[in-house]
Structures are given as C-alpha cells and as structure tokens.
Image (cartoon, helix red, strand yellow):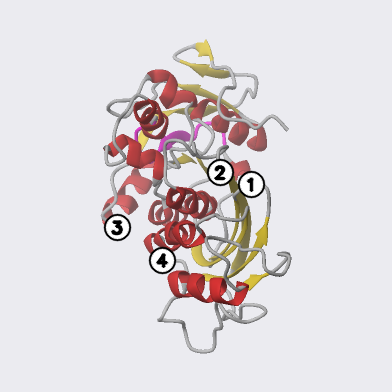
Amino acid sequence: MNATDGPPGVPLGGPVRREDDIVERIAAIVGRRDIPPGEVHVGDDAAVLAPFVGQTLVSTDTAVWGIHLDAALFPLEDLGFKAVAAAVSDLAAMGARARAIVVAVTAPPGTDLEELHRGIADAASATDCPIVGGDLSLGRDVAVAVTVLGECPGKGAVLRRGARAGDTILVTGPLGRSAAGLRLRRAGAGLDHPLVIAHRRPWPRLAEGLAARGAGVHAMMDLSDGLALDLHRLCDASGVGFALHDVPVADGASDDEALSGGEDYELLIATDDPARLALVLHGRGLRPPLAIGRIVTNRATRTLRGEHLERRGWQHSL
C-alpha cells in the first residue's frame, strides 16, 4: 500500500503523522498473516500473486461518503465495508472465486483512516479475499475505489448476455431489505436493526454465484440498482424480454423497495434447469432460489403480472 499526493506535513488522518506511520497502521489493520507462499501483498510497490486458474476477472467500484452512504446516519467504518462488498459482489455475479482486493482512498485532513480501513478489513475477512495493496491521497471528499480480482476455472464466467427464451428467472433471496433498512434508519432505528444491517453491511453472494456457475446457468448479475432496472439490463444484453409473475418482498420492506430500492446484492439468474440449480444450492447448504418469471423471445415484452414494468432504480446523475 502506497501513500502519495499529500504535501509534506499535511496529515492524512487525525493528528500530524508521517505518511509512513499511517500506512504502517493501516497495513496492520488490513494485512493477512496467512499469505500463500510466493505471494507478496501489502508493503511493496506492487502485489505479487500466484497464477490465476481459468479466466481472470477484474472489476472496480467507487463509494463516496455522503453519496453511497449517508454520513449523518452511519459510521465511516460502514463506507469501507460497503465499498468492498459492492465490488466483490461483481465477482459473485459472474460465478468467480475472489482472489484479491486493491483499495485506493482519498480523504480530507482529519479523516479517521483507521476507522475506514477497519470496515474495509471486515469486508475482506467476511469474503475471504485479501487486501493486497492500495493507495492514499488527500482529497476534498472521502472516496474509496476498490478493484477486485477473481478467477473462473473451467467453462468460464457467467455473463449477462446468455439468457434464452424459455429460461426461468430466479433470485437468490427476497428483495428490498437494504432500502427498507435505510428508511428505518432515517426514522430512528438503531444500527443493530436487522434491516439496517442489511443496508450498512451487505453480503456478496459469492457461494451462490459459484454454485450457479457450477449448475450451468445461462445468465446472471447482481441486484445492485434494483430489480426493475437490473432485469432490463440483463435482457438488453441478451436481446430478450421477460414476463414476471412475482416479486419476493422481504419482511419489513415495501413492494416499491423490492422492485427499485437497490443494494440488495442478491443474484438474478436465468436458467433452463431451475431444478438442477436448486439441487446444487441445497447440496452446498444454501437456501433455495426463488422463481419470479420467464424469459420470452420478444424483447419488447417487459411485464410484471401482465403490466409493463418500467425501468426504475438507482442511477447516478452525471
């Protein structure tokens, strides 16, 4: 992990401290003790990793304090956790094994970088994916850019563009928990409320993604921006339409939160063999998937219970 771009004497967090001291403290937080032989993680100019098996996957996400997480309602630690979890979820969406994480942080003087990196380390530990390097820089806002590396042996990654007419559409769990958690937190719910935890500490479905790839599903993506937007994206990529008969709403969430709330990070799956998918998930101790509709040939058909389903969900205004 490198520290750059700060004028001499300007702190990157807390009281005036040398950048090397800050990096050393962060390395102690995020570094792993069980580094595989021959690999080099945090501490050098670049990480050294053993060869990847099959296809190599790379994805990057950025989380900004006050944009991706309400700074008035949640601790800085949660921003670090969410940034890593969202990026790792992109690997889950393609059925990949998570191999490594690189984190770059910009922050204004006085930011508690240790707190931020404790959240980053928690997410890395939860997903069993090591932090192997990163960077620090002064900036106007707190922002965390996370690059994840994964691997897909065998037949390779599951893409969005493989859905076929007749496929069953499934999700790995009920929807709307994250959006409901944010609503409840704004209304005064504690940080330990189960739905609030779903918003502040999302769980990437890595095990489910690996199982789905093993079951030979045709298409898959994670539900980061809401079902009513992400399903359109999957069908756009595949050149097909959809007909939904159900939307599984999480306990405590509303129909609208389940459709367009976003940040659930459940997996959206299209397969012609849902029984095999359910069997593989069951064999790995995972909950059964929920069937919500079918892929249809006419790409203009985009319906929920026979009514057209508009695109709606989370999108940045850039």
Residue 246: image x %, image y %? 39, 22
Q: In this view, does 298 lie above or below 153?
A: above
Q: How far apart are marks 3 and 4 (CA)?
A: 17 Å
Question: Which of pointers 2 and 3 indicates the residue nearer the eye?
Answer: 2
Q: Residue at x 55, y 78 (%)?
A: 41
Q: In this view, does 197 lie above or below 205?
A: above
Residues at marks 1 and 2 touching, judged by CB atoms closer than 8 Å: yes
Q: Crowding near pointer 3: few (<14 within 10 Å), some, many (20+)?
A: few
The residue that label 2 is drawn on is 65
Q: Position of residue 137 (x, y in %)?
A: 67, 61
Residue extent of the magenta highlight: 164-175
Main SS category, magenta section:
loop
Marks 3 and 4, the one that precedes in the sequence: 4
Q: Earlier in the sequence, mark 2 or mark 3?
A: 2
**Distance Cα–Cα, label 3 vs label 1:** 42 Å
Image disc number at residue 141: 1
Return the mark for residue 284. 3
The mark lying in front, picked from 3 and 1, is 1
Q: Residues within 10 Å of mark 2 (few under 14, many from 20)?
A: some
Q: Earlier in the sequence, mark 2 or mark 4?
A: 2
Instruction: Please indicate, yes or no, whether residue 271 appears anywhere in the rendered image.
Output: no
| C-alpha span from label 2 to label 3 | 36 Å
Residue contact at pointers 2 and 3, CB within 8 angstroms:
no
- Of badges 1 and 4, nearer the viewer stands 1
Observer-side mark, 2 or 4, equals: 2
Cα gap from disc 1 to disc 4, whole angstroms: 29 Å
The disc labelled 2 sits on which kind of residue?
Trp
Secondary structure under tag 2 reads loop
